[in-house]
Each structure stands twice: as C-alpha cells, then as structure tokens.
Amino acid sequence: MLDQKLLRSEPEKVRKGIQNRGGRYLPALEELFKKDAARAGLLKEVENLRAKLNELSKKRAVEEAKQAKADLQKKEAELSPLENEARHLSLGLPNLPHPSVPLGKSAEENRMLRENTSFRRAMDFKPKDHQDLGQALGILDFEAAGKLAGARFVVLKGAGAQLERALIQFMLDTHIREHGYTEIFPPYLVSGEMLTGTGQLPKFEEDLYRVQGENLYLIPTAEVPLTNLHREETLAEEKLPIQYTAHTASFRQEAGSYGKDTRGLIRNHQFNKVELVWIAGPDKSMEALETLTRHAEEILKRLEIPYRVLELCTGDLGFASCKTYDLEVWMPGENRWREISSCSNCWDFQARRMNTRYKGKTGSGFVHTLNGSGVAVGRLFAAILENYQQKDGTIQIPQALKGYFPEPTIS
C-alpha cells in the first residue's frame, strides 16, 4: 500500500510513478484522489459536529444536542462507506518504481546487467527440449498427470522424482548453511488477509485457488506465509535483517495464459519452489536486494547453468515491487532464455498492508520486505535436462549434486 501522506502531499510524484508503470492504473488513482478529498471534507464535518455536540452537552442544551447527535450519526454513516471505497482503491494500486529503475514500457526494454555463459556447452547434435527428453527417459509423465488432475500438471517418476528432491535439498542446504537463512515449513493454505498483505489480493484473485466456502487459499508462492510471519508486529531494529527460506509447492491458475507455454514444466498449475524472503531496515534494503540476488545466482553457478541477470524497467515491474532483478537460464532445446527467479525489493509497500514495523535507536517506521526464488525447482529441473543432455539422450548430473543424487547420469 502506498503511503497515504505521500498521496496527499505529493500527488504529482505519485502520478508520475504510476504513469511510468504504463499508466493503466491512472484512472483508479484519480478516483482515489476524488474519494480521499471527499472523505477529508466529510471527516472535517464529523469532527465539527462532535465538537459542537460536546459543547452542547456541557451547556445541557438537550434539544439542540439531540439534533446535533442525529446530524453526527448521519455524517458518520456516510463516512464509513467512503473510507471503505478509498481503502479498496488504495489496495488496488501498485508500488511506485524506485528512482534507480530504468524507464521502459515492456520487457523488451529491460536492462541486461551481467551474463555468465562460460558454462554454455557446445553440442554437435540438435538439442531436444526438456519435455521430449523427460518423456523419452520415463521420468516425466504428463499423460498420467492429465488423468489425475488435468492439463498443466506433471507426474515425476523414478529418477525424475529423485532429481527434484535432490535439487530442493541442495538449494536449502546452500541457503541455510552458507547464506544464513532460517528454514521455515509453512502451511500451504493461508487466509485472504495474508494475501492482501503481500499484494495478491484483491488484484489477482482470479489467479488463486480458493477453498470453497472458506476464507482460505492455496499459496501461489511461499513469499505469502513467510512475509506474513511478522504481520501486526513491531520488530527490534537490532534483530534486522531477518532471512527466511522455505521449500513449498506453489499453486496458480495461470489465468490469462491460455495457450502460452503449454509444454513441459514452465507454466504448470502446481510447482515446487525454494523461496528467499528478507525483512530489512529501510536503510539496508537495497543492499539486501543485491545480496539476495547473488544468493540465487550462486545456485546457478554451482550447477554450472548458463544464466544472465536483467534489471526490469518500470513497465515490467511486478505489482508489489519497487525494483526487481530477473535471473534467466539458457535453454538450448528451446534456443531461448527462460526466467528462473525474480528478486524484488517491495520497499514498505507490503509492510504497510501488513502493519509490520521496526523500532530502535535510529527511530521507528515500517520495515522493508524483499523476496526472490532461490530458485524455481521445475524450471531448474528443465534447465538441467536441456543443458546436460548427451547425444544419446541421457542426462549427466551436475557435479554439485554429488551426494544428493545416487547416479552420475539419468539413462
């Protein structure tokens, strides 16, 4: 949620920030300005009537006090829905881009920061994509998944299930033992209030799976429960930053993506992810974003997967983010780059929605929250199959997984 003081004191700054995101939220912003002005005017009337009623009560002017009370109740009744409408509009507005974010309208204008192609392997054969490889090896079964649940699910079999488990364990061990994260195993179901806190509601409800008749949703990412662990709390400044990691399944309806990325493991309704979440002090959050991104990169380095890091432009930022780095891996079977992690600083946007604060020697205020995949397991699985495929269709296992996976190859 945007700072209400900023909305009222610097409306042009807010307009410019929303415009730089592409402008589609400008009508809602202008409506919020109108509602907030009306709310402010009505609130002033309510406060004047309260003061008048207080004075009349002191004077024992019974009849006049009775009329003032009736007027006050009427105005208060008008104020409540106006406040609710303003809050709903406010919850639907995205975060403002950080001043350091490059201007741009779409993903085509994202800025490439660095690229590590030293692991890119020369192949003297036409590489296959991960779906063809996995099906030929009998480790990916989309037909069985279709029978069980429908399209965009997968059954991992034998070495496929083992590889998925090995990747999860490898990433968790790296982040916990070397990068200082505390592991969490959260519920896969959260209340609507938790999703409102991190920004998925009300904007993206159509992409969520809801339990019928209950205020419970399957998590679209572990970011939701991890970030909300400190909802409605004031944290001691000296305890910051807090770093959490978790492996969970994630569930997304992929609304609006009909016909897009239907092959393989790229855009399924259920997928595994190792998530990284930071809760930091305001003066350290940009530094934290660089560190979090390097932690995700380290996984790709150790597995020797070609990757690159992009800085997203203003028009491609996620709803809650003020600054994002995307990590993309090279997929030789598709002959293209694929996103495998988005590392974002959400500034105080989520903290305001969750009412998560800090207090310490330097002052008090809202914390800053950050998140990123460390990394998406299914996409990493796919990247390993495509980058480590051999001419005979077998898959070499990365050296970094020695001790996590029982065999040197999948055949």
Image (cartoon, rainbow, N blue to C red):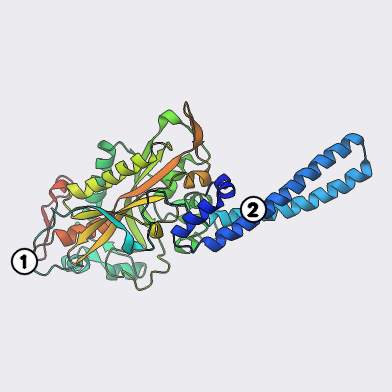
In this rendering, the answer to whether 236 lies above or below 198 is above
Number of numbered tags placed on the structure image: 2
Separation (CA) of disc 2 from disc 1: 65 Å
Q: Which of 44 and 327 lies nearest the eye of the viewer?
A: 44
Q: Is residue 272 left or right of residue 210?
A: left
Residue with the most extreme left position: 124
Q: Is residue 300 above or below residue 145?
A: above
- Which image quarter is the C terminus in? bottom left
Determine which residue is flagged by label 2. Answer: 36
Q: Amino acid at mark 1?
A: Asp
Q: Which residue is mark 1?
A: 124
Circle 1: element type: loop
Q: Earlier in the sequence, mark 2 or mark 1?
A: 2
- The image shows residue 43, relative to residue 148, as above or below, that is above
Residue farthest to the bottom? 259
> Residue at 52% of width from left, 56% of height from top?
15
Residue 363: image location, x then y, percent:
50, 30
Is disc 2 placed on a helix, strand or loop? helix
- The answer to which of 205 and 369 lies nearer the viewer is 369
Residue 265: which quarter of the image?
bottom left
Q: Position of residue 127 (x, y in %)?
A: 13, 67
Q: Nearer the viewer, mark 2 or mark 1?
A: 2
Whether residue 234 is visible, yes or no, is: no
Q: Return the x and y of residue 337 as percentages of the image width and height.
A: 24, 62
Q: Residues within 10 Å of mark 1 (few under 14, many from 20)?
A: few
In the visual, does 211 lie left or right of 285? right
Q: Are marks 2 and 1 in contact (CB under 8 Å)?
A: no
Neighbor class of circle 2 (other Cα within 10 Å; few <14, some 14-19, many 20+) is: many
Classify residue 10 as left or right of residue 120. Answer: right
Residue 379, image quadrant: bottom left
Give the residue displayed 71% in from the left and 51% down from the top: 41
| Amino acid at circle 2 | Asp
